[in-house]
Image (spheres, rainbow, N blue to C red):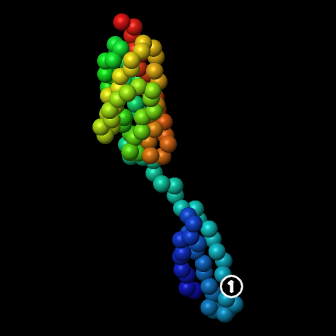
Amino acid sequence: MASWRKALAGFVFASAVSFMGCDGATTPTPTPTPEPTPTPGGPLACSPKSQTVAVLEFARLVASGGETPYQWDTTGSGLQKDSILWLRFGEPGDYQVVLRDRVNATDSCLVRVAAP
């Protein structure tokens, strides 16, 4: 009995052809391929989760985990370098900053801007 394996669309098909009876029958047996392992860096995280700064003072946020590159969604003005974002706001208030990675996982941090 001869057998062969073929990977197709996430499945491994194993077929056996019987040459003893020369019937040419095949029996495909689908076997699911394991899912890829999660991101080695762990879940996406923005830190610190909350901080308070003065008007126009820079807040420093750090991204970790997830899959790079990172994207920050905010209404403040700032500068991003690799996984670090320096950010400032011109008005007092609470500002949510959303961190997004390559696979669209998200996390958020709060920057509280104190009134003068």
Residue 76 visible to the viewer: yes
Whether residue 7 is situated above or below residue 87 in the rendered picture? below
The residue drawn where x is 54% and y is 75% is 6
Q: Position of residue 94 (x, y in %)?
A: 46, 16
Whether residue 17 is situated above or below residue 86 in the rendered picture? below
The residue drawn where x is 31% and y is 40% is 82
What residue is disc 1 on? 25
18 vs 91, left or right, is right
User: Viewer-proximal residue, 43 or 3?
Assistant: 43
Q: Quadrant of residue 99?
A: top left
89 vs 81, left or right, is right
Whether residue 62 is situated above or below residue 95 in the rendered picture? below
Whether residue 89 is situated above or below residue 116 in the rendered picture? below
Type of amino acid at the residue the image marks with label 1: Ala
Q: Residue furthest front?
A: 90
Q: Quadrant of residue 1?
A: bottom right
Residue 66 visible to the viewer: no
Q: Position of residue 88 (x, y in %)?
A: 35, 22
Q: Residue furthest top?
A: 116
User: Viewer-proximal residue, 4 or 51?
Assistant: 51
The residue drawn where x is 48% and y is 46% is 103
63 vs 38, left or right, is left
For label 1, count other residues whose C-alpha is less than 10 Å away and answer few (under 14), some (14-19) or many (20+).
few
Count of labels in the image: 1
Instruction: Tell me the quarter of the image containing the C terminus.
Output: top left
Q: Position of residue 91 (x, y in %)?
A: 42, 15
User: Viewer-proximal residue, 76 or 63?
Assistant: 76
Secondary element type, mark 1: loop
The residue drawn where x is 48% and y is 36% is 106
Q: Position of residue 22 (x, y in %)?
A: 66, 93
User: Viewer-proximal residue, 79 or 69?
Assistant: 79
